[in-house]
Image (spheres, grey):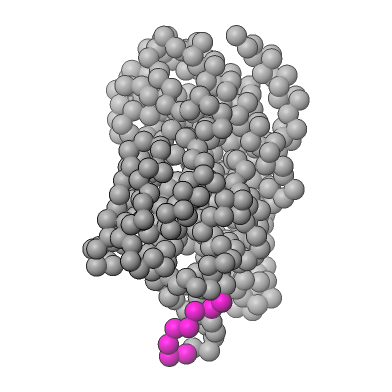
Amino acid sequence: MVSRDEMIALDRGDALAPMRDKFDLPDGIIYLDGNSLGPLPRHVPARLAEVIGEQWRNDLIKSWNIHGWMQMPQTVGDRIAPLIGAGPGEVLAGDSTTVNLFKLMAAALEQRPGRKVIVSQSGNFPTDNYLAEGLIRFSGGEHELRLVDGDDVTGAIDDGVALVSLTQVDYRSGYVQDLAAVTKAAHEAGALMLWDLSHSAGALEVDLHGADADFAVGCSYKYLNGGPGAPAYLFVAKRLQDQVSQPLTGWMGHAAPFAFEQSYRPAPGITRQRSGTPSILAMSALNAALDLFDGLDLGLVRRKSLSLTEHFIQLMEQRCGRFGFALASPREQVRRGSQVSWRHQQGFAISRALVAQGVIGDFRAPDIMRFGFAPLFVRHVDVWDAVEAIEKLMTSGGWDRPEFHQAAAVT
Ligand SMILES: *Cc1c(COP(=O)(O)O)cnc(C)c1O
């Protein structure tokens, strides 16, 4: 069994170790929820203060031009692009993942008029499937949402399918879909492919170009640390940009927003995916947070992530195997994202009790305890200490108190 000192030695040899100090983490906690809300990077408050105090206060409305506010959805998108294997002018920052899903699902259906099926997984993130349901209702109810149980979706893709809409890394299990293989299967059937990269970007290497993907969306408040409710992003492959339209045809996606023309004319390129005025404060926080990824080797990030999750699985099985935790994440490394989940009948109460002790993971109904290992700040020693805390809690029975059984609005 690996010792605590051996884990500390791994941290000493970790080329990413200096990144941890770039975050303003509270004392006394082990934060294993960076996959749900990334922590505050130290330099972000000062940058936001500058945007508020200098740009907003002093330069007022001139800032739209002189501080590049108007272009921020594109310029921030261009900074996200290299993290997901996209090129300049292919990614737009803004709106929420939910809204971006709606735009791109609608765009895809319009591109495949004769086809009436959207393929997704029953275990996909709820918003993805809810949006598909809503879109189908509003577009006349002629489409079918075909939900696949389990992770193998390719068998469900036939020549009636307009769109395959999947999340690359499953939010519950952390299962990683084969981006290239599934995209290829969709294309071979004549369907379009939409990837939700919410649990991928910033944690593993994503190659949208390599996979020849059509569309993608994702969150930037998880591994990208953009702040609560940070602007999301969307990707449309260059080859499709001028042929697709989207339903939220607001003035910011117009070819000439300040001509105030009578009728909508889409802007060329990715800009037509814009809808309304971007939230500049939120966009500025995200823009600053992205500095952490400048020049960062994502291969290194992925290797550290796998080392953390591998050690967590091993230590949990060695020290806590007798307490009834069942691994809900893939053992195979290529199929495992940057999180490890365990099923446990008392998962909710155990996870609340752990939070009370400063080990912050989360819980996903019905019985999943989820631990995220954001490689920029989680250390090997944190993995060891978290398992120690879980073992102690299970041995003492300290998780079984009434307050830990009480539901909260956000789990
Ligand atoms: C977190 C997450 C979202 C969140 O969407 P919002 O619009 O930001 O609420 C969407 N999809 C997936 C797969 C997620 O993990």
Residue 220 placement (x, y as % from top left): 54, 51
| Quarter holding residue 380 | top right
Q: Main secondary structure of the magenta part?
A: loop
Residue 25 placement (x, y as % from top left): 61, 37
Q: Is residue 357 left or right of residue 399?
A: right
Q: Residue at x 35, y 40 (%)?
A: 123
**Could you say which is closer to the camera, residue 192 or residue 273?**
192
Residue 333 placement (x, y as % from top left): 56, 28
Q: Which residues are magenta?
A: 261-268
Q: Quadrant of the C terminus?
A: top left
Q: Is residue 401 above or below residue 206?
A: above
Q: Is residue 407 left or right of residue 392?
A: left
Q: Is residue 218 covered in magenta? A: no
**Could you say which is closer to the camera, residue 129 or residue 284?**
129
Q: Quadrant of the N terminus?
A: top right
Q: Is residue 368 above or below residue 135?
A: above
| Res. 362 in view | no
Residue 4 placement (x, y as % from top left): 64, 14
**Could you say which is closer to the camera, residue 58 or residue 360?**
360
